[in-house]
Image: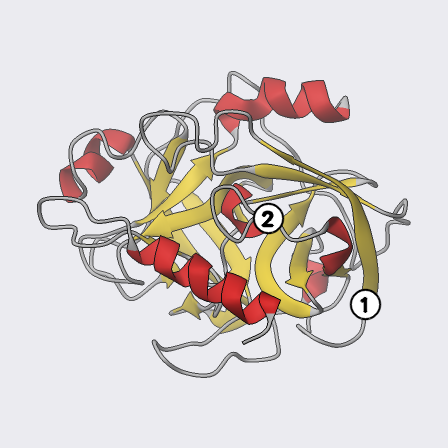
Amino acid sequence: MNLFAASFALFLAFCESFIIPGNVSRIEYKEELGRIVGGAQTDITLYPYQISLQLYYRHRCGGAIISDRWALTAAHCTRLNRVTRPPILAFTVRLGSSFLMAEGLVTGLTRIVDHHMYGNSVNLLDYDISLIQLARTLTFTNSIQPVALPSADQVEVPGARCVITGWGTLTSGGTSPSRLHVVSVPWISNESCNQYYNPSRVSYSMMCAGSPYGGRDACQGDSGGPLVVDNVLIGIVSWGRGCALAGFPGVYAYVVPVRPWIANITGL
């Protein structure tokens, strides 16, 4: 087994280790295989902020362009486990393409900045968000554009229509389509979300979205991808129980409370 395979096996074992009491038997990071469940095929020109974060030129996670040099993704996407990160030269980003492994622009990274509270709080899933600096300055086109960031005092709007984009299998265990997909789900308040998950499992650094009847969701490989409300980036795909299960909405890193951190790092 080579070093990458061994590290990836360690990562899978790490993900399986999140055992929590009650009805939720296992937390699943929405990472690696990737799927938008219950959505439809779409075009990058409609969601030009979407990127594919790739490890050794294979899709690992989604992400969102926020400026000509910066993008946001999930912190767990930048690591093999809590302490191990692949070399930065192993990461590339494909942007400006509807297709996962073709067309568009491919560039490397020069910097990865995980939120300083990721892995350092009581809830290990808190602040699952990372800034990635691109190796080149982007020229914006109709297929490469930044998404707007929220203000630090953005108001929570449960019930609002959330738009999620990404690549991946359309059914559990299926194969990943090559073309970008999109789905919309309603925003769910954290109070309601904690009725589905363990009390207080969904913290201030998270937000929830999903159909109470299931059938529509982000899932593995959509991790790090954008959740957008009224053309503003509100969430980053993070975790959930299974995919598109009734009674278990998706949980997202909440961009609003980390807005000052983003400004401090990027000047945005």
Rendered location of residue 206, percent (x, y): 39, 33
Sequence-wise first label, 2 or 1:
2
- Which numbered marker is on residue 78? 2
* Type of amino acid under label 1: Gly
- Residue 11 appears in which quarter of the rendering? bottom left
- Give the SS element for disc 1: loop
- Which numbered marker is on residue 84? none
Q: Which residue is mark 1?
A: 104
Q: With 3 as the anchor, is 135 left or right in this view?
A: right
Q: With 214 as the anchor, is 50 left or right in this view?
A: right
Rendered location of residue 195, percent (x, y): 14, 38
Q: With 34 as the anchor, is 78 left or right in this view?
A: right
Name above or below for residue 57 compared with residue 241.
below
Which residue is pictured at 51% across the width and 16% down the height? Answer: 153
The answer to whether marks 2 and 1 mark residues whose Cβ atoms lie closer than 8 Å is no
Name above or below for residue 211 compared with residue 73.
below
Asked if residue 225 can be seen in this view, the reply is no
Q: Quadrant of the C terminus?
A: top right
Which residue is pictured at 65% across the width and 53% down the height? Answer: 86
Rendered location of residue 58, percent (x, y): 65, 70
Question: Rounded to the nearest whole Å, what is the CA distance between mark 2 and mark 1?
Answer: 22 Å
Rendered location of residue 151, percent (x, y): 59, 21
- Mark 2 against mark 1, which lies toward the viewer? 2
Q: Pick the residue in front: 6 or 92.
A: 6
Number of numbered callouts drawn: 2
- Residue 243 appears in which quarter of the rendering? bottom left
Q: Quadrant of the N terminus?
A: bottom right
Q: Pick the residue in front: 245 or 73.
A: 73
Name above or below for residue 165 compared with residue 189.
below
Which residue is pictured at 44% across the width and 33% down the height? Answer: 119
Asked if residue 22 can be seen in this view, the reply is yes
